[in-house]
Image (cartoon, rainbow, N blue to C red):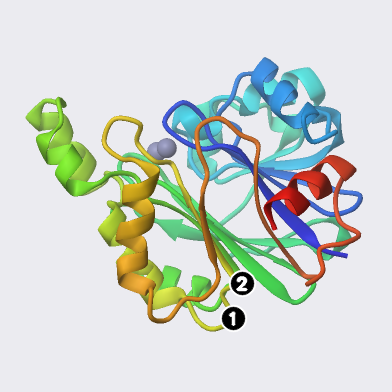
Amino acid sequence: MGLSITHLGTGSRGNATLLSTESSHILVDQGFSGVQLEKRLSLLDVSPNDLEAIVITHHHGDHGGGALIAQKRWGVPVYANHRTSQELGLLPEFTHHFESLDVLQFSQGTSLLPVPVPHSGADNVAFVASHGGERTAIITDSWIWTDELVHHVHGCQHIAVEANYDSNRLLNGPYPRSLKDRISGRGGHLSNAQTGQFLKQVCTDQTRSITLTHLSEMNNAPHLAESTVLFEIDEMFEGDINISAQDGPHFSHFIGRRDGDGFATNAIQRIARELL
Ligand SMILES: [Zn+2]
Ligand SMILES: [Zn+2]
């Protein structure tokens, strides 16, 4: 059995990523309205009622803004750290609190490790999911990386990481100076070049796939993100690299089984085959 990774959409207008086995579904972040979540999942033959859990990276609206709706409307259990849960006003009866570096165990042998990620005004975490002896990392909203993050992401088979802005586009773009400083400064986001430098430290010959996420619509473009990152890792990375846009779903990869058969829903298998 394998675990498929499908981004329902990433960007400043909402983030959610579905991790699916043949019979279980876990959502990482729920930054969409209830209607949008239902619609995007339905394209994968999944209903919100099928979600075993939603795990939240941090409380910003584009990541956690739809968690409470999922609890109220479908009774989905939400996993979050204390700060995130408090900021989102989550319902205690449907909330599980975690501490960083405590492994979260789910069905079908899937586990998630929350790793702290620096981000302004939030207790943000990345998740490293393990399944079938392989690992995938989901990292977003960071202005820098720590040795601890490098340690846990190093050698993952699949890595999804934000590539938020192109430095030149941000510098020459229409945003006011204060906002430009906030995005590029402490607490903001990773530029394409920073993402490339981070990937250079964590990719190994085990890494088969990279997905760049959370691209700014104003200050970035897929070809800029991809070429800047490839410039850093070209000599060491032979896998596939793709982009998750704001409008998904977008299948990324699967771990835990090389041929990709026998995982998730028929719809996910279909879009996976089209891509692979
Ligand atoms: Zn954020
Ligand atoms: Zn964000």
For the residue pair 58 and 234, the one nearer the viewer reads as 234
Can residue 205 be seen?
yes
**Percent position of residue 120, x then y:** 30, 43
Q: Which mark is residue 22?
A: none
Query: From the image, which quarter does the N terminus lie in?
Result: bottom right
Image quadrant where one finds the C terminus: bottom right
Quadrant of the rendered image holding ligand 2:
top left
Q: Indicate yes or no: mark 2 CB to ligand 2 under 8 Å.
A: no
Give the crowd class for mark 2: few <14, some 14-19, many >=20 residues within 10 Å: many
Residue drawn at the location 54% of the way across and 83% of the way down: 205
Verify CB contact (< 8 Å) between mark 1 and mark 2. yes
Placement of 210 over or under 225, stated as above or below? below
Q: Quadrant of residue 208?
A: bottom right
Q: Earlier in the sequence, mark 1 or mark 2?
A: 2
Q: Which mark, by number, is residue 206?
A: 1
Q: Is residue 68 left or right of residue 169?
A: right
Viewer-proximal residue among 119 and 24: 24
- Residue 268, image x, y percentages: 79, 45
User: Local crowd at mark 1 within 10 Å, few (<14), some, or many (≥20)?
Assistant: some
The mark tally for this picture is: 2
> Which residue carries the number 2 mark?
157
Q: Residue at x 15, y 45 (%)?
A: 168
For the question of whether residue 144 can be seen, the reply is: no
Cα gap from disc 1 to disc 2, whole angstroms? 6 Å
Q: Is residue 83 left or right of residue 169?
A: right
